[in-house]
Amino acid sequence: MTLLHDRLAQLLPGLRSERSAMLAQHAELELCAVSLGQVYGGLRGVIGVICDTSVVDPQRGLIIRGRPVRELTGLGVEEVFWLLLCGEYPDKAQKEWLRAELASRARVPDYAWSVLASAPPDSHPMVLFSLLTLSLQRSSRQARDYHELGKESLWRATLEDALDLLARLPVLAAAVWHRDQGRAQAWADSPAEGSWSERFAAMLSLTHSPPAAAAFADLLRLYFVLHCDHEGSNACALACHTVGSAHSDACYSISAGLNALAGPIHGLASEMTLRFVLAMHKHYGSAPSEGQIEDYCQQTLAAGRVLPGFGHAVLRAADPRFVALHSFAAEHISVDPLYATADHYYRIGPAVLASAGKAKSIHPNVDAITGPLLHHYGLTELRYYTVMFGLGLSIGMLAQLVLNRALGSPIMRPRSASLAELRELTGTG
Ligand code: CMX
C-alpha cells in the first residue's frame, strides 16, 4: 500500500455510494436534449461524460476540483496530480511521498529505447512520443494482473500504471526531444533529485545561465500545472476515456489521447501561432511595426484564414492560463524580439477580430503565448510543442483513468444512426 492508494481507498466508498444513490434516485433525469445539429456538429454542448477533475467555465476558464486555475499557479505537478485525483491538496508527507515515488519509478525499460532507435529519423515527435508510450504496455500491471482482479480492485492496478507512466512520460518526452535534435544517444535516465518538472527541465539539457535555468524550470512547472487537464471530453481526453473504458490499460489509453491531440485542429495551435509570428518577421524583414501587424492580420482574415492563438470553443473571457503565462513572459522575456512582436499581436489581434465580427471570443488563448516562451528558452523545434502539450494533459488523463476504473465507469457505447433512419425521422426519405 502507498499513501495515494490509502487516501483513495478512504475516499472511494463515499464516491461510490454517491454514484449509486444518484443512479438509484435520478437515473431517468434528462441532462440535456440532443438535436440533429448537435449530432452533425461534433456533439457540441451534449453532456456525454462525467468528469470531476476539472471543468471549463466560459467566464472563469479552467476550474480544477472547484479551484480556479489562477489560484493554482504556485503548485507543482505532484500537488496538482494529487489534487486532480483526490480533490484535495496533499499534506507535506503525502507530497514528499509522491515526489519520491515518481522519482523512483522513472527508469524506462530498455525495450522502449529499441523502439525509439528503430523509428525512421524524420518521424514526427508526436509519433515517437505516442509510440514510446504504447511500447510501455508490456510492463502494464493492469494488463498483467487483469484476470486476477475483481472490478472493485481494478483501480489499484490502474493507479500503479498511472504512477509508472507519470514518472516515465517526462523521460520519454525528453528522449523525443534529443532524438528530434538528431542526437544519436537520445535517452538518459531521469536525475534522482528534484521535482517532476525540474527533472524534466534537466533532461532536456538546454544551455542556460544559472538565472535563466531557474526561470526555465519555473516556467515548466507553471506550464504543466496550467496544461494539466481540460475536462473529460475534448478530443484528446475523450479518446483516452473511450479506450480506457474498454479496460485497455493506461499505456493504450494515453497513447490514444496523444494521437488525438496530434491533429492539426486540436493540439497544434501553439506551433501555428509561433509560425505566424515568425512569418510576420520574415515578411517584413525585421520586427514589424504595429501598423504592419494590423495589415498582416487583416490580410490573413481576408484570405479566409484564422488568426492563430485567438478564440475558443468554450471560453468567452480572457483565458487565465494565457494571463498567467503572459505575466511570466513580461517579467522574464520582454527583451526577446520575437516575444515583443507576439505581444503586439496579442494587443492588435482582438480589435481586428472584433471588426471582422465573427469570432465569439476575441481574446488570445493559451496557445498564443506558449510558443514564444518555449522558443526563448531554446525549444526552437516547433513540432515539439504538441509533445509538451501532451505531456501536460497526460497528468489529468491519468487521474481521470484511475477515477473511472475506481468508480466502475462502463464501456462507452453511444448509438449511431444511419442516414436512412434520419431520412425517416425528418420525413425526407
Ligand atoms: N480567427 C479568425 N476567425 C475566427 C477565429 C480566429 N482566431 N476564431 C473564430 N473565428 C471564426 C470561426 O472560424 C467562425 O467562422 P465561420 O462562421 O465562418 O465558420 C466564427 O468565427 C465563429 O467561431 P466561434 O464560434 O467563435 O469559434 P469555434 O468554436 O467555431 O472555434 C476555435 C474555436 C478555437 C477553433 C477558433 O477560435 C479558431 O480557429 N482559433 C484559431 C486557432 C486557435 O488558436 N486554436 C486554439 C484553441 C485553444 C484551445 O482549444 O485550447
Image (cartoon, rainbow, N blue to C red):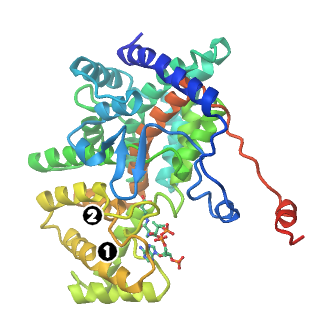
Residue ID for mark 1: 277
N-terminal of the pair, mark 1 or mark 2, is 1
Expressed as whole percent of the image width and height from the top left, the position of residue 240 reads: 56, 41
Expressed as whole percent of the image width and height from the top left, the position of residue 200 reads: 30, 39
Mark 1 touches mark 2? (CB < 8 Å): yes
**Cα distance between the residues tagged 1 and 2:** 9 Å
Residue ID for mark 2: 372
Q: Is residue 15 above or below residue 398?
A: above
What's under tag 1, amino acid-wise? Answer: Val
Image point 38% across, 17% down: which residue?
A: 7
Image point 86% across, 69% down: which residue?
A: 427
Q: Nearer the viewer, residue 397 or 119?
A: 397
What's under tag 2, amino acid-wise? Answer: Pro
Callout 2: 10 Å neighbours few (<14), some, many (20+)? many
SS state under label 2: helix
Q: Nearer the viewer, residue 3 or 196?
A: 3
Left or right placement of residue 159 versus residue 320 in this view: right
Q: Quadrant of residue 28?
A: top right
Q: Is residue 385 above or below residue 144?
A: below
Expressed as whole percent of the image width and height from the top left, the position of residue 96 reads: 25, 21
Q: Quadrant of the N terminus?
A: top left
Expressed as whole percent of the image width and height from the top left, the position of residue 294 reads: 29, 86
Q: How many marks?
A: 2
Q: Nearer the viewer, residue 56 or 127?
A: 56
Is residue 269 something one can see in this rendering?
A: yes
Image point 32% across, 67% down: which residue?
A: 364
Callout 1: 10 Å neighbours few (<14), some, many (20+)? many
Left or right placement of residue 98 versus residue 358 in this view: left
Is residue 127 something one can see in this rendering?
A: no
